[in-house]
């Protein structure tokens, strides 16, 4: 994998640092942006972020180098495996009376039920996101999930950072006919038993697989956007469980075991043990092909009628010690230079939250990637995530029925 460079080019530095000058400084709680930048200098930001990918970790290291060079902010990646652990820690700090600027977390990579919990319990600083100078480039019209996280309005309490959509990928030499729905996936599993699976819940990708089926089979998809109730759960899952019952015996190892995560599924697909893998990053297969870990014959696709998609964010806990510096980091993450590097297959391949056609020509040129093997050639509609409150009962009922 290419190693991150130490510094941006002079042109990219100007783009990243100068983006804020394209609009007036926005007031935040009576404090202008230049004052926030000044207060941020010399501060350390402890960023609690998932660390399960070498490319993600390398990108965060690059971000740390840039915010130090541009803003005098030290960024420390606190590597985590489950964001729920961060929520528990901040919750415990509040219970212990560690308020004001006494917290251990300055920034957290977050979305979904974890954001919903922190927002509901008053564990977040803000609103701040829409006051960031670079927020003006966010595609809030074309990507409404940048303002709505698992059907929970963000209300400026978290800043969008990247896009995701449920995507499948397979070696076209082994799977020339790509299933275009969960029902078609069941037919494929019946025809080739043991060649399909998904990660064990509560792994995020495993849960997303189940949610995709829920969205496809729910009698009233609009009901999924509302907080879950026992009655709604029973009504909207009436077709889900029969589908999963029918699928299970045809899964890998007859559904009696499940891989731990999506990386394991991807490796099994690469080894020929499975026919396909799943991801929430539409560029993952192209990324793996570029890194020589998958053959160029691998293709990516999304179901014709759409797949679940969402935005991932960064948020600042209410008791963060370095709130000014955390805002500076969040703003840098939204800069065209930072978003373009994140979207670059050679570095990460995480889709941008920005409205690229609206960018000035120089910044827009940073996003030109070309037609690379493994990219989704025809994007499908993005289906909204169920309300965050649906996750816990789905995972518990799946575990009750199929957990081993």
Image (cartoon, helix red, strand yellow):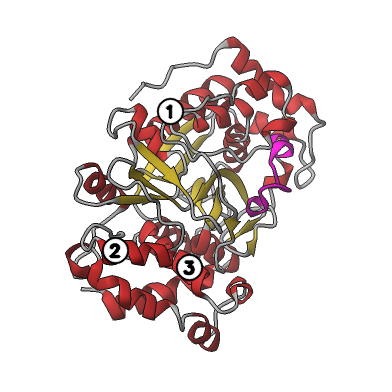
Q: Quadrant of the C terminus?
A: bottom left
Q: Is residue 234 above or below residue 252?
A: below
Q: Is residue 329 above or below residue 382?
A: above
Work out how far the residue at label 2 is from the one at label 3, CA to CA, in angstroms. 49 Å
Which of the marked residues, 2 or 3, is nearer the chain's N terminus? 3
From the viewer's perspective, is the residue at label 2 or at label 3 nearer? Answer: 2
Residue 295: % across, % down: 29, 32
Asked where in the image residue 241 lies, by quadrant, the reply is: bottom left
From the viewer's perspective, is the residue at label 3 or at label 1 nearer? Answer: 1
* Left or right relative to 354: residue 165: left
Work out how far the residue at label 3 is from the one at label 1, CA to CA, in angstroms. 40 Å
Q: Is residue 137 found inside the magenta-colored segment of the image?
A: yes
Determine contact: label 2, label 3, CB under 8 Å. Answer: no
Identity of the residue furthest to the top in this view: 10
Classify mark 3: helix, strand or loop: helix
Which one is in front, 3 or 288?
Answer: 288
Residue at the image position 69 percent from the left and 40 percent from the top: 138
Work out how far the residue at label 2 is from the one at label 1, CA to CA, in angstroms. 34 Å
Residue at the image position 61 percent from the left and 71 percent from the top: 225
* Left or right relative to 6: residue 33: right
Residue 144: % across, % down: 68, 53
The stretch of residues the image draws in magenta is: 133-146
Residue at the image position 71 percent from the left and 36 percent from the top: 137
Mark drawn on residue 189 = 2
Circle 1 residue: 347
Residue at the image position 31 percent from the left and 60 percent from the top: 198
Classify mark 1: helix, strand or loop: loop
Classify mark 2: helix, strand or loop: helix
Mark drawn on residue 95 = 3
């Amino acid at each position: 994998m290419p190693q991150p460079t130490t510094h941006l080019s002079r042109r990219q530095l100007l783009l990243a640092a100068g983006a804020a000058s394209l609009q007036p400084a926005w007031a935040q709680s009576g404090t202008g942006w230049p004052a926030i930048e000044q207060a941020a200098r010399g501060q350390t930001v402890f960023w609690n972020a998932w660390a399960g990918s070498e490319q993600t970790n390398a990108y965060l290291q690059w971000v740390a180098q840039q915010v130090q060079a541009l803003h005098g902010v030290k960024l420390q990646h606190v590597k985590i495996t489950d964001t729920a652990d961060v929520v528990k820690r901040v919750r415990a700090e509040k219970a212990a009376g560690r308020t004001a600027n006494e917290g251990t977390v300055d920034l957290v990579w977050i979305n979904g039920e974890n954001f919903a919990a922190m927002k509901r319990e008053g564990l977040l600083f803000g609103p701040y996101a829409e006051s960031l100078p670079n927020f003006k480039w966010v595609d809030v019209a074309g990507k409404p999930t940048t303002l709505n996280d698992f059907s929970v309005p963000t209300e400026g309490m978290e800043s969008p950072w990247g896009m995701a959509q449920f995507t499948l990928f397979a070696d076209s030499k082994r799977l020339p006919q790509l299933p275009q729905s969960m029902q078609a996936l069941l037919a494929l599993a019946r025809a080739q038993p043991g060649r399909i699976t998904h990660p064990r819940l509560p792994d995020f990708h495993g849960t997303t697989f189940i949610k995709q089926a829920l969205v496809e089979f729910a009698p009233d998809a609009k009901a999924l956007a509302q907080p879950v109730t026992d009655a709604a759960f029973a009504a909207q899952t009436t077709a889900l469980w029969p589908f999963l019952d029918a699928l299970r015996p045809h899964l890998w190892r007859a559904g009696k075991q499940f891989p731990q995560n999506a990386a394991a599924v991807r490796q099994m697909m690469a080894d020929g043990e499975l026919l396909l893998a799943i991801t929430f990053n539409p560029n993952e297969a192209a990324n793996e092909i570029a890194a020589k870990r998958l053959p160029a014959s691998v293709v990516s696709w999304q179901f014709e009628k759409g797949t679940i998609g969402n935005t991932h964010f960064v948020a600042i806990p209410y008791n963060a010690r370095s709130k000014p510096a955390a805002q500076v980091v969040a703003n840098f993450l939204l800069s065209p230079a930072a978003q373009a590097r994140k979207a670059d297959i050679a570095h990460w391949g995480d889709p941008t939250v920005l409205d690229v056609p609206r960018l000035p020509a120089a910044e827009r040129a940073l996003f030109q990637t070309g037609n690379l093997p493994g990219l989704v050639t025809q994007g499908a509609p993005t289906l909204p995530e169920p309300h965050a409150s649906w996750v816990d009962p789905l995972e518990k009922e799946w575990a009750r029925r199929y957990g081993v």
